[in-house]
Image (spheres, rainbow, N blue to C red):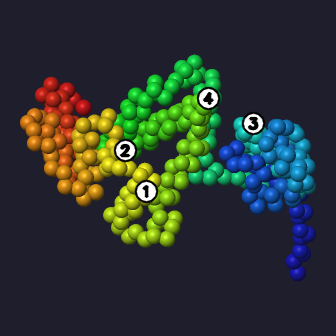
Amino acid sequence: MNAISPAAPSAAPTGRIVLLTTSHRVAPGLLSWPAWQTLHAADKVLCADGAHPQLPYLREAGIPVEEESPAAEDLVGVCAGGRTVVVVATGEGESALTDGLARLAGSGRVPMPELELLPASYDLPGARLLDLVQVMDRIRAECPWSSRQTHKGLAKYGIEEAYELVEAIEEGDRDELREELGDVLLQVVFHARIAEEHPEEPFSVDDVAGGIVAKLVHRHPHVFGDETATTPEEVKEHWLRTKAVEKRRTSVTEGVPLGQPGLALAAKLASRVRTAGLDVPLPRAEGIGYELLALAVRAEAEGADPEAALRAAARTYRDAIRAAEGVGE
């Protein structure tokens, strides 16, 4: 009969370290259920930042938090015996602690506790817009150039950025498109920040966002209301009908900016005429302007954007010029 060897004593439990991360873009106290469970069950909760926005809410929930920033070796020692320690990460992160734990684990000198990263709150879609508003607010207050800008002074940049966005779209450059969208967004946030300082009629970026949200909801009754639209044409019909009620315009030409490029202006006027079902003959006059007007109206009727078509042709012409000059791309 073979003797049965006694079982080797099991290793002492090494415990668990949980690094709890939160998003500053989500209101403090709005933590996930797993985060609350872990916090309540923890043997010790630590936070190096005594002013961390989550601390009042944790303490209100009956969770004692110690304001400490232990070294990796000390934290591992606290976990000995199977204890769970939660470290509430500061806004700057806990790089010193995580680097120290990594070095300690790599040394093989001590048994390491279980390490876990637990996100307690996540950014909602669009949350980074809050960062943009915050950054713009600081720039407006502290930058010598930005603090002196006005709506009129910035107007030219809005036009330039819009054109650069259109160029990125037409070129099909995804990286450039992302950057140019950011530049256009900056113009919106910048103007909204300036508008906050108006002495009589101030408004903020929240007012701007609230206005466009209300407009979108009102003009999409087939999405947010009881109406039905199954084709793009029906959607456009809803949009134009609700827009007409909102604006109470007496002419289809109202709201068409006359300062836009000529071909775009001609096409927009033609679109308004066609949509309203009006029979308006083109002016009978001589000159290149009237010839261009007729071409723009024809392009709009055929579903083409005359500005985009001319830009495409101009780019081809540019390439031909460079080829004639012997200039490579």
How far apart are labels 1 and 2 at the CA level? 14 Å
Q: Nearer the viewer, residue 158 or 182?
A: 158
Quarter residue 157 falls in: top left
Q: Mark 4 or 2 closer to N-term?
A: 4
Quadrant into which the C terminus falls: top left
Amino acid tagged 2: Gly
Closer to viewer: mark 2 or mark 3: 2
Residue closest to the far top: 144
Mark 4: give few (<14), some (14-19) or many (20+) Cα within 10 Å. few
How far apart are labels 4 and 1 at the CA level? 32 Å
Q: Mark 3 or 4 closer to N-term?
A: 3
Q: Residue 222, percent across and down?
A: 45, 67
Q: Mark 1 or 3 closer to N-term?
A: 3
Taking 142 as reference, is 102 above or below it? below
- Image side of residue 291 versus residue 29, left or right: left
Quarter residue 132 falls in: top right
Determine the secondary structure under disc 2. loop
Amino acid tagged 3: Ala
Closer to viewer: mark 3 or mark 4: 4
Q: Residue 216, percent across and down?
A: 49, 55
How far apart are labels 1 and 3 at the CA level? 61 Å
Determine the secondary structure under disc 4. loop
Q: Nearer the viewer, residue 311 or 7?
A: 311
How far apart are labels 2 and 3 at the CA level? 58 Å
Q: Nearer the viewer, residue 172 or 189?
A: 189
At 88% from the left and 62% from the top, the residue drawn is 10
Q: Which residue is mark 1?
A: 245
Circle 4/circle 1 CB separation < 8 Å = no
Q: Mark 2 or 3 closer to N-term?
A: 3
